Structure formats: structure tokens, C-alpha cells
Amino acid sequence: MAGLDWTYGVSTLRQWESADYEPSLPVSEKSNPLTCDIDRASAYSIVKMLQVCDSQMFQKEAGTTYQRLLSDQVLKTLMEVAKRVEVIIKDPQESCVVMSGCGTSGRLAFLISSGFNKALSQLNQSEVYSYIIAGGDRALLSSQEAPEDDPRLGVLSLKKVCEGKKRVLFIGISCGLSAPFVAGQLDFCLQHPEVYTPVLVGFNPAHQARDEPIQDCTFTFHSVVQRMQELAKSQKAFLINPAVGPEAISGSSRMKGGSATKILLEVAFSAAHAATSSNTPITHNGVLQHMMEYERTLAVTYSQPDGITTLVEAAGESLRCSRHVYYLGWGSLALLGLIDASECSPTFGADYEDVRGFIRGGYRELNNNDGPLTSLGPKFSIAHEDFLHLILPCLTDKDTVLLIYTHSDDATEVGNMARRVREKTPNLHAVYHQADGDTAASLQQDNIKKLCLSTLKITWPQEALVSGTLQHMRELSTKLVLNAVSTGAHVLKGKIYQNHMIDLQVTNTKLYRRATRLLQKLSTCPEEKCEEALLKAIYRVDMLTLEMTSSDITTHTCFARNSTKVVPLALVILLTGWSLVEAESHLKQQPIVREAVAQWMW
Ligand code: S6P
């Protein structure tokens, strides 16, 4: 890979847009041609691939097939949404903005609502933002994929949050335009237009919205989108659905999908806040300029590929020898660490101990709806104190620890933490954000730097401070770095085949369909045979009973919650014709899934 040329031609960058490229798949599920060899790439090449993939978010619109982040229509809709938010901020008594989503989309709803509520409080204004995450607050920190399939649950949680409200701007986030949980909520909004104005955020064109029947419902995601499109003509509903290109790891919408969600909503809300607090009008150019600041954020972050590579290598090495990666963060950047860590389990089939996040101040800082969740189990211990009590005593030099902080965090505190960790392992690294020209903290910073094996120092221009967007830029930048670290480390561990996660959990309908498709692609066997192998792997039998084959997908996905290595197992069965026991023992001997299946692929 050493000679890999990063100046991809336009045709490669835009190959996914061609009508005959994986035509049956929505953009959010397509595989990205840029990363088809990511499983064999060096850490540096992985970082460069992620950079190019992320840059696709800001590609200009070409033709009429796909709207893009910077498309006129997207900017116009953002302005309209911003105006609605402005009205709510000015009259918060009986109105609110609710964001809702599943998995990463719900976590971002939480992150964004927390940030903007804080901003309102600082101005002595009433908080207007609420979040809903499928599966409740425990899903902020752990994988809860099943509630995604439940539209009734979505409606119930929406009603609860909106009790007593007369005007609600509801923002449903589903990157793939696919989550029944969100479809149920949007449908409910459409039935109660006197209170609710629905907004949909996602990253597929409307016609690619999922059209699969939803159990006990008369609507599909697709039919809900069609109704919204009709209402959008009179601005009674809004669709914000630019394409950002396929994810680097197919279907991993936590990456670009999550970043683009953050960008779009922050741009709209920031415009609304500026309009209320400083009477700055919401303009097309203002919104466009703000979007472009995020494009610069990508450039600033990825201008240090070597620094990011060092982190990916360290984390990859830890995971390869079954050790751990720990993110120790301060403020909202720590939240990005918690989010990134929580996603490793559904994305890579990782154990919660593989990559863990900790936040200074624990649940006090998190300030989530349900308060402390520590009683739910060890994975919900998230404070720095928890790290010091539970993790530090057993820390070895095979573990990687990453400090994530900014120049405005308490450097003495960061330094103390660095020293404590350094007594146990030299494998300590830092991601540090500072403002251009900021020298005040440099002495303490130098001391911390000396304790760290590497420091990724990201410097932000002073203008960012002035325009008040610095926090958002640092957050996105941290998200990009951590996504690169956890994705890269799992790639290096051998969890990815080409650019597909093979060892995915099959815990909801979307993942069940993805797993079947993946088996078809890799084995070239017909769909029916692939589904049969998948069920054998889920139920761990060589002969499926009638009860198994006649059950619905929900039953399969419920059962799959307790099964491991389901898809690799099904693939080995398909490729070799072996029995379940033989396939299982083969996988045990070769735990690197990519290697285990690769030898049967050629
Ligand atoms: C994806 C992540 C998932 C998704 C969730 C919601 O990387 O692991 O948890 O966020 O499935 O997807 P969507 O398309 O409705 O936003």
C-alpha cells in the first residue's frame, strides 16, 4: 500500500453515484469503492482513506440525482427549520424542540440537545431542547439495537416528552431513513399537525427510504416520507436528506452519518440562537459560511495524518493482544469518547471492555434524563474516579490510554491523571485542542506532553473563538479522530473483510437484512440458502425446525442477542459445507475473522 496515491480521480470519488453501482442498495448501505482494500491497509493508509471518505461529505452536487450538504435546497430547508427554532426559543412556555433517534442518531440527539440547552442557560433563557433515544438512557452508553424496530415505543416516548406542549418541532433522525422507531414518531406527528411539525434528518434520497412492512403498522418508512414530501410543499414538514456518500465501513452510519447529523443540526440551531440573542438575521450566506467552517474542521483535523496514525497503531496493537483502549476525557469532548466507545460493541462485535470512555465529573457532567445509571452494571461506570478505582490497578503497558482535553480544561487535573497513568504504563497519548496564539497554558501543557508517548495537538484559529463555534469544531474534530482510532484499531485487529464488518450483531431487522446481503455477496449463494445458514448460526443447529423457519425476524433477532460470531459462522458453513460444530471449531482456531473466512474465499 506504500505507493497508494491519495489524489483519487473524480471518477473514483464519485463512482458510488453512478446509477449502476450497487443499484439495489440505498447510499447508506452501499460499500465505498474508496475503502474496498481497507482490511489490508497500513494504519497510515487507513487514516488517509477515512480522510477521503469524510471529504465526500462536502462534495458539490453534480446533476440532479443526489442533494448534498451544501446544496441550495438543503440550505434553504435548514433556514426554515432555524426560523421555527427561533420562534420556540422566544416563546418557550408551551413549546419545545425534540430530537429523536436510535443508536448513534439518539446519542447525537443527546449531545446536541445538551450543548444547546447549556448555551440557552448561560443566557438565562429557558431550555427548549429534549432528546429521545430508542431503548432509553442506557442506550447512550451501550448497544440497544432491538428497540429500533418498535414504532409504538417511539410514539410512547414522544408523547411522554411532549406532555402539555402546544407546539413541538420534532426532529427524527435516521441516517438510513429506515428506523421504525422514528417512522412511528413521524407518523404520529403527521396525525397531529396542530401540535407537531415533523422534520426528518437522514442521508438517503427520499425514494431510497426503507419500504419494508413494519409489524402491526399500516405505514412503512417510505410511505411516511412520501406524506412528508407532500406537506413539505407547504412547509408543514421538512426533509433534510442530503447524500454524504457510502460509509468507510459499509453501513457504519456512526461515521459520516453521525458527523453530518451533528453539522446540520448545529448549523440550524446556531443560526436560531444568533437570531434570538444578537438579532443576527438567518441568511442563506450565513448558513453556507457556517457549513464551510465544518469543512475546514475536516481539513484542520486531517492535516495531521501521522499523529492520528500513531493513535490508530497504538490502539490496534492493544486490541490485537486482547488488551484495552481507554478514553479519558474532559467536558463535551469526553462525551464523544463515551459515544465512540459504546459503538464498538454493535459495530465490531467488541466486548464493552475493549474500548471504554470515561468523563470527568461522571453523570453530573453527563446530565442525562435518567441521572446516574451506575446500578445497571459495570459498563455504566463512567467517571474518572471509576477509571482510577476499577481500571488503573490492572493497567499494563499493553493498554492504550488517550487523554482528550482542551486548553480551557484544568491542566493541573489533566497532569495529575497523566502522572497516575504514567506510573502504570508508558502507553499514554493525548488529543489536545488549543487556540491559535494561546501560550498561557503552555508550561503545564509541556509537562503533560512529556508524560505522553504522543500528543495530537490540534490548533484552532482565533476566529473560531469569536464566532462561538469553537466548541462544535473541537467536538467534530474529536469525533473524527476517535472514529478513526476505533475503526482503524478494529481493522488492524482483523475484524473487517474488504470494507464489510462480518462479525456484526444481528439484533434488529436492518442488521438481519444486512447480514443476509453480506452472506450473498461473499458466498455468491442464493438468498434463501444464505438465510438458512444465518438461522443455523443464530439457533446453533444443523437442522432447522419448522418452528424456527416459520418464526418472524423479530424472534430471530431476539434469539441472536445471545449468539456470537453468527455471520462468520454462517459464512464458513456456506463456503465449506461443514457442520456447525466443524465451523465453530475452525473459527476458534482462527479468531481473526478476516483470516478465518479469507482462506475459503478464493
Ligand atoms: C451505526 C450504529 C447504529 C445506528 C442505528 C440507527 O454505526 O451502530 O446504532 O446508529 O442503527 O441508524 P439510523 O440509520 O436509523 O440512524
Image (cartoon, rainbow, N blue to C red):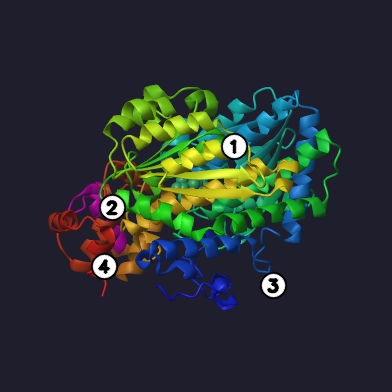
Q: Which residues are magenta?
A: 530-547
Judging by the rendered image, the residue that carries numbered circle 4 is 598
Q: Identify which residue, 93 or 512, lies in the foreground.
A: 93
- Magenta: main secondary structure equals helix
Query: Which residue shows up at 42% across the image and 41% down it?
Result: 451
Q: Secondary structure at mark 2?
A: helix
**Mark 4 Cα-neighbour bin, 10 Å: few <14, some 14–19, many ≥20:** some
Question: Taking 338 as reference, is 385 above or below it?
Answer: above
Residue 193, magenta (yes or no): no
Q: CA distance from mark 1 to mark 4?
A: 51 Å
What amino acid does circle 3 point to?
Answer: Gly
What amino acid does circle 2 point to?
Answer: Arg
Disc 2 Cβ-to-ligand 1 distance below 8 Å? no
Query: Which residue shows up at 30% across the image and 62% down it?
Result: 530
Residue 293 at x, y percent in the picture? 69, 53
Please indicate whether residue 578 sits to the left or right of residue 17 in the image. left
Q: Identify which residue, 456 or 369, lies in the foreground.
A: 456
Q: CA distance from mark 3 to mark 1?
A: 49 Å
Q: Identify which residue, 106 or 580, lies in the foreground.
A: 106
Judging by the rendered image, the residue that carries numbered circle 3 is 63
Q: Secondary structure at mark 3?
A: loop
The C terminus - image quarter: bottom left
Residue 540, magenta (yes or no): yes
Residue 508 at x, y percent in the picture? 40, 46
- Residue 571: which quarter of the image? bottom left
Tell which tag, 3 or 1, sits nearer the viewer: 1
Residue 65 at x, y percent in the picture? 65, 68
Do tag 2 and tag 3 residues touch (Cβ < 8 Å)?
no
Mark 2 and mark 3 lie on one chain; the one further toward the N terminus is 3
Judging by the rendered image, the residue that carries numbered circle 2 is 320
Judging by the rendered image, the residue that carries numbered circle 1 is 441
